[in-house]
Every structure is written in structure tokens, then in C-alpha cells.
């Protein structure tokens, strides 16, 4: 009887160990804080954690906060080789992205995000979205599939008692400033949020430039031995690649376009891409058109490999090139 009991306990222990290993190797991202109670003027440290069985080449996170209670200052990543990618910040959302030229193993802290407590209040920090990035066969930065977001919401209690000014910290690692703008007009908040959602999908602009070694991103010219391409990152045609064999190429909702996007926020003939002086250009035809977050209104602007283009509210693609 004793031997059977011992054998049963051994099997149970083995099962527990296997389950624990499985839980640890599952890809996931979660948010924690060093403590839930603070005083006005103290530094709140939120920690973005991750576990991944596969090495990554970047990550991104968006933390929702109450700008009346908290002000973000910076994020610091101690993951070796991770470089910060500056993104436009909006009030109420701390948006951070990092990328590396070489795969890095992660199983713990990705980044520590610092906020300053502004006044007494009860509030929350919410990990609104996050992704781990890898490089696909084409060299593009794409989100690692199957990554779950756990522990996305943490409560904070900030006492109205004010502490004396804290000494500046000596930070080790890659520092990313997260200072929000002084003010954001409410009439622009809708498309700004849409822009942030678009930027979530894989650190596409900054990481692509790092990953695509040898592609001249500062030049207006694309080699004559290459064809321009569009890689759809968000919207009705997400995941598709279009090679622009014939220019000009019109984009819109009407069936007459070379690239048809069936989206209610896309107009019949929304934009077109054309070639001029050995360069490529995007022309807005009356819809909402943005390149790297900058509006293009009834005009044309040069397209470079790695440029992120948004049409309407959420249709997003990356302009690139491929060999003939």
C-alpha cells in the first residue's frame, strides 16, 4: 500500500511540474506595479512582463491612464539589444515600442514604465494592448501570433498627502521618453486614437527600418530592379500583399480601382500611387489619407520603403519593394 501511495504521489508531482512548465512557456504579456498605494508626487512604476518560448525582435505596449491623476515620464527596457522607437504620444495613453536587430529571449520584465502621481485619487492602469514582434520571411516586423494579454488592469490608490521632491533616478537600459503633449484638441481625438490602434500592429514603421538592412529609407528613389509593393496591415484586406505592376494604381471602394478596399470609411476613389522622376508618390483624392501620421489633403507626397499609410479610420498598409 505504501509503495502504491508513493507511486501515486510521484505521478501527481510529475503532472504538476509538467503543467507548470507549460504555463511558463505559453506566450503572454501582463502588467504589474511595485505597490498599489502612493502619495502625491511619488513615482509610480508599472512593469510590463512577458513570457515567450520564441525569441523576439521587438515589442509594443499601450497603457491607458487617467491624465488627471498620473503623468507618464519614461519607459526603460533592460532586454539586451532593444532600442526605443519614438511614437507620437496622446494624453491618457502611454505608447511604447522597442525593436532589436537580433532575436532576444524574454521571460520576465520587458519594460518599466514610470508615472508621476499628480494628486489624491483612486484610479487604474490598464494594459490596453500589447504585442511581441518577430521578423517574417520577407523581413517585415509582424506580431507573434498566439500571445495572450493577462492581468491587464491594476488599481492604484494615490493619497492626497504630498511628498517632497524625489531625487532624479539613475536609469540603466534603453530609455524611451513618454511625455504627453501639453494639450490635445478634442476634435482630433477620434483619428488620433485610430492612429494609435494602427501603430499597435507590429512597430511597423520603426522596426521595419531596423530589420530591412540595406534598404535606402532616406532616398526618394527605388531601384529599377525592384517593384513597389503594398503590405496590408489592418482593414478588410489585412494580410494581403499587392505588387504594383502597373502605375498609376488607384485605391478605393469602387470596383474600377486596381486595389479595392470595401470599407465604409473609404470613398469611391480614395487615393492613387504614381511614379515620377524615378520615385513613387501617393496622391489623396478627397478621403482621409495619412503617411506616418501626417495628413495628406488633396495633394501628393513621396513614398519611401517603410512608410506607413492610413486610409480612412483603420485601413493601414506599409509601402515597400521586392526584387523583379
Image: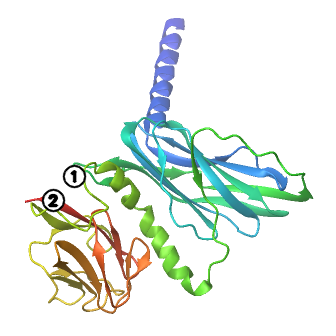
Within 10 Å of disc 1 (Cα), the crowding (few <14, some 14-19, many 20+) is few
Foreground of the two, 144 or 10:
144
In the image, residue 79 sits, relative to residue 134, either above or below, namely above
> Which mark sits nearer the N-terminus, 2 or 1?
1
Q: Is residue 98 visible?
A: yes
Q: CA distance from mark 2 to mark 1?
A: 9 Å
In the visual, does 168 lie left or right of 171?
right
In the image, residue 26 sits, relative to residue 257, either above or below, namely above
**Residue 159 % position (x, y):** 87, 57
Q: What residue is rendered at 44% in x and 27% in y?
A: 18
Q: Which residue of the protein is positioned furthest toward the right in this rendering?
A: 161
User: Residue 248 occupies which quadrant of the picture?
Assistant: bottom left
**Residue 179 % position (x, y):** 64, 62
**Residue 230 % position (x, y):** 23, 68
Foreground of the two, 222 or 42:
222
In the visual, does 307 lie left or right of 200?
left
Q: What residue is rendered at 71% in x and 62% in y?
A: 71
Badge 1 is on which residue? 138
Q: Is residue 145 visible?
A: no
Badge 2 is on which residue? 322
Mark 2 touching mark 1, by CB under 8 A? yes
Amino acid at each position: 500500500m505504501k509503495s502504491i501511495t508513493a507511486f501515486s504521489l510521484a505521478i501527481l508531482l510529475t503532472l504538476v511540474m509538467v503543467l507548470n512548465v507549460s504555463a511558463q512557456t505559453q506566450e503572454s504579456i501582463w502588467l504589474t506595479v511595485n505597490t498599489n498605494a502612493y502619495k502625491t508626487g511619488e513615482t509610480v512604476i508599472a512593469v510590463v512582463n512577458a513570457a515567450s518560448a520564441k525569441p523576439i525582435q521587438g515589442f509594443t505596449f499601450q497603457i491607458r491612464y487617467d491624465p488627471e491623476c498620473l503623468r507618464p515620464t519614461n519607459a526603460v527596457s533592460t532586454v539586451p539589444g532593444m532600442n526605443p522607437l519614438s511614437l507620437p504620444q496622446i494624453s491618457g495613453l502611454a505608447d511604447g515600442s522597442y525593436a532589436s536587430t537580433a532575436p532576444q529571449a524574454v521571460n520576465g520584465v520587458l519594460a518599466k514604465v514610470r508615472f508621476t502621481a499628480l494628486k489624491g485619487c483612486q484610479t487604474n492602469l490598464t494594459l490596453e494592448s500589447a504585442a511581441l514582434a518577430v521578423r517574417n520571411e520577407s523581413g517585415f516586423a509582424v506580431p507573434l501570433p498566439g500571445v495572450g494579454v493577462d492581468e491587464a488592469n491594476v488599481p492604484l490608490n494615490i493619497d492626497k498627502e504630498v511628498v517632497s521632491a524625489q531625487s532624479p533616478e539613475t536609469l540603466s537600459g534603453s530609455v524611451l521618453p513618454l511625455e504627453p503633449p501639453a494639450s490635445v484638441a478634442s476634435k482630433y481625438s477620434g483619428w488620433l486614437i485610430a492612429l494609435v490602434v494602427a501603430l499597435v500592429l507590429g512597430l511597423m514603421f520603426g522596426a521595419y527600418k531596423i530589420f530591412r538592412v540595406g534598404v535606402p529609407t532616406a532616398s526618394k528613389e527605388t531601384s529599377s530592379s525592384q517593384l513597389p509593393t503594398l503590405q496590408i496591415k489592418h482593414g478588410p484586406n489585412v494580410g494581403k500583399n499587392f505588387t504594383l505592376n502597373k502605375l498609376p494604381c488607384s485605391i478605393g471602394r469602387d470596383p474600377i480601382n486596381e486595389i479595392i478596399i470595401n470599407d465604409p470609411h473609404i470613398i469611391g476613389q480614395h487615393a492613387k500611387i504614381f511614379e515620377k522622376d524615378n520615385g513613387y508618390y501617393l496622391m489623396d483624392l478627397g478621403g482621409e489619407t495619412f503617411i506616418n501620421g501626417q495628413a495628406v489633403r488633396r495633394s501628393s507626397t513621396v513614398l519611401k520603403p517603410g512608410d506607413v499609410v492610413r486610409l480612412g479610420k483603420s485601413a493601414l498598409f506599409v509601402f515597400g519593394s521586392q526584387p523583379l
